Amino acid sequence: MHSTPAIEVDGLERSFGDVRAVDGISFTAEKGQVLGLLGPNGSGKTTTVRMLATLLPPTGGRASVLGHDVVTDAVAVRGRIGLTGQYAAVDEALTGRDNLFLIGRLLDLGRQEAKRRAAELIEQFGLVEAAGRRARTYSGGMRRRLDLAASLVGRPEVLFLDEPTTGLDPHHRNEVWEAVRTLAEDGVTVLLTTQYLEEADQLAHDLVVLDHGLVIASGTAAELKSRAGGRRLHVRPELPGEAPLVAAIVASDVGREPVLAPSGEVVVGTSDPGALRRVEDRLAVAGIAVAEIGLRLPSLDDVFLSLTGRATEGVPA
């Protein structure tokens, strides 16, 4: 007998006037796992999260969280979820401890229970030394950890994290990643939206790739990488303006049209290890200086390039 998925989405749609932001998507997330919803700005990730969190009604299809329909049983859904948006929503005038205590009281916890829960989360998220300081003095990474802690005061079974590391430097991003790993280990189901491919690779058990409101691929990171084929030949010329010429040389050698990334890098799949030396020689003959060239195993960046013909970065919202 199969257990009920933590999240079940079937043909979900949302339109804003003539714009269909989410166009009939379907996926499931199992209990206790991290599902990564991956895609560029404007792909429909945040709209999907808002519908699942009962903040926005669908215009078609259906979705449920822990077996409760997000439209007809919205109250039950709200009692079982937590949500952290793209920007930390903490009260900067309050201390970290008071932020969590206030949320506990708003969730009808008694004063002592709210204090205990705040203390537990402060410990869990490594904020003990800063607990008595006002949130306005926190670093970006600390604010995000406090925001995560705030979304867990009510002990949700499912947590929606909508681009939780937007704007953070690598150090603070790692802090948030560690917090998400801890949540998953504790049995919380996490739906993580991100446009950072490395983040999805690091955290998610399974991935759903969105583009223009559609699911264009799904599976584990390993499965999606295998779908992208074998090794990737990548070339980045010293002069970005020479990228089209590099692409033409690469195409004539490997017999396939490469993808030109916004960074100026030319990428193409090939199973021929000799392609690297041949392309190198032809670029030298053409007098094209190369900043970087090599063969690598496919990454999630390559997966997205192969699926959409462009990278996630630099895509307009």
Image (cartoon, grey):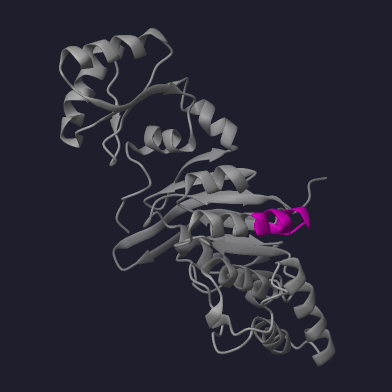
Quarter of the picture containing the N terminus is top right
Q: Nearer the viewer, residue 69 or 192?
A: 192
Q: Nearer the viewer, residue 108 or 281?
A: 281
Choose top left, top right, bottom left or bottom right for residue 223.
top right
Q: Nearer the viewer, residue 148 or 281?
A: 281
In reply to whether residue 96 is colored magenta, the answer given is no
Name the residue: 21% across, 15% down: 284
Name the residue: 29% across, 15% down: 280
In reply to whether residue 181 is colored magenta, the answer given is yes
The vertical placement of 243 against 75, above or below, is above
Q: Is residue 169 left or right of residue 314?
A: right
Q: Is residue 63 left or right of residue 114?
A: left
**Where in the figure is residue 265, as x and y percent of width and height?**
30, 33
Residue 153: tell me if it is visible: yes
Q: Which SS does the magenta portion mostly show?
A: helix
**Where in the figure is residue 210, as x and y percent of width and height?**
45, 48
In this view, the residue farthest toward the front is 129
**Where in the figure is residue 219, as x and y percent of width and height?**
58, 38
Q: Which residues are magenta?
A: 178-189
Name the residue: 71% across, 53% down: 5
**Where in the figure is residue 26, as x and y percent of width and height?**
54, 50
Name the residue: 73% across, 64% down: 157
Residue 233: tell me if it is visible: no
